[in-house]
Image (cartoon, rainbow, N blue to C red):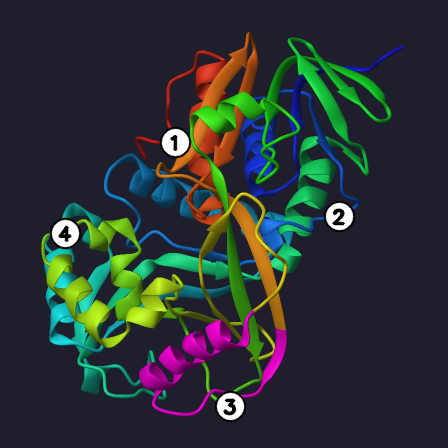
Amino acid sequence: MEQQFDLAVVGAGIVGLAHALAAARLGKRVVVIDRDAQANGASVRNFGFVTVTGQARGEVWRRARRSAQVWDEIAGPAGIAVLQRGLTMVARRPEARDVLRAFLDTEMAQGCAWREADDLADRMPRRGAVLGALTSSVDLRVESRTAIPRLATWLEAAHGVTFRRGVAVTDVETGRVETSAGAARADAIIVCPGDDLTTLFPDSFARAEVTRCKLQMLRLADPGWRLPSPVMSDLGLVRYLGYAELPQAGALRARLEAEQGEHLAHGVHLIVTQSADGSLVVGDSHHYAATPDPFAREDVDALILDEFARVFGQAPPPVVERWTGTYASAASHSLVEAPLPRVRLVTVTSGTGASTAFGLAEEVIAGLYDLPRQGAAA
């Protein structure tokens, strides 16, 4: 006899796991089905940086705030180490400083402050020619390669979530999921396919003009100093919409186009996080295609490392690891549809899954079960 569940989740990335958590907290019997034997996609090929500061104003920023709260709630019980807290957003140009000071006048600046360059020693033991930085206390960073597997293990042990791995889902209909290992029945189904845009509900992705984004990332050897928080710089101010949509960002973009046009052409901006062993995770770039090639370009890595050298005032440590990742991308934060009764299709299309998935999942689950939307209003 087929086992009956309250909810079936297709996809065991961070978006799928977030929905499993939100449902399990309501006492629902949940099964998560994934074609891979272990986490292998975008959820483990990123910084593990739960970024609140700089997310798009309004509901996305509120989702990020809520998601950071959930990460804090589950990290201890799930055995997930929070390795860094906050953000140091460096300004190398007066125009960048203007953007950050304007940001401080918004409601999004909770937990943020401006600090001059000579007051950054505790945040940046090494720095180049920077004017100062916006510092935040509301962001956090985990090691995604271990955090995602530990989250899944904890969901199984503490919340009774069932996992079926190495199982491909071939079709979904109301109340039933067809898989390579037979059918699974569930009262409700949430499909979280990441950047698989063709297997399930391809028409929905086509209508929303969802494509894929490839990024390049690097791990650098321990530099001999420690960063209490992740570091970003001017290039990020024209990518993260919480800054980029401010009027002051126009002057910065014009100067960056003149001075670092090649960086912008490859979607390069700088995020530097630090792992428990002292190594630095550094990135990234953005290239868009329906099927991105799997190859990392040396010239793109060189642009990332160039920005690192400018911000930290030293040559980058040796590269010890390189990789690429891909994620679903569209103009909006996410695609959330109801293609069938009691079925939801959910994909984060902004590269912010780690930062916003818990908040988004609470909204979706609340809607599915006709509950108040607590997460988005937190």
Mark 1 or 3, closer to the camera? 3
Above/below status of 353 relative to 147? above
How crowded is the residue under tag 1: few (<14 C-alpha within 10 Å), some, or many (20+)? many
Judged from the image, the secondary structure of the residue bearing numbered disc 1 is loop
The magenta stretch spans residue 352: no
Residue type at numbered disc 3: Gly
Instruction: Judge left or right: residue 210 versus residue 376.
Output: right
Q: Is residue 119 visible?
A: yes
From where the camera sits, is residue 227 visible?
A: no
The magenta-colored residue range is 297-321
Residue drawn at point x = 43 percent, y = 59 percent: 140
Q: Image quadrant of residue 156? A: top right
- x then y, percent, for residue 196: 61, 37
Who comes first in sequence, dot 1 or dot 3? 3
Q: Nearer the viewer, residue 216 or 152?
A: 216
Of 29 and 182, which appears nearest the observer? 182
Q: How many other residues sit within 10 Å of disc 3, few (<14), some (14-19) or many (≥20)?
A: few
Q: Nearer the viewer, mark 4 or mark 2?
A: 4
Residues at marks 3 and 2, CA–CA distance in whole angstroms: 33 Å
Q: Which residue is mark 2?
A: 38
**Numbered disc in front, either 1 or 2:** 2
Q: Is residue 92 left or right of residue 173?
A: left
Q: Which residue is mark 1?
A: 375
Front of the two marks 4 and 3: 4
Circle 3 residue: 224
Percent across and percent down for residue 251 are 11, 63
Q: Residues within 10 Å of mark 4 (few under 14, many from 20)?
A: some
Q: Position of residue 71 (x, y in %)?
A: 49, 48
> Secondary structure under badge 2?
loop
* Distance between mark 4 and mark 1 Cα atoms: 26 Å
Q: Earlier in the sequence, mark 4 or mark 1?
A: 4
Residue to which mark 4 is pinned: 246
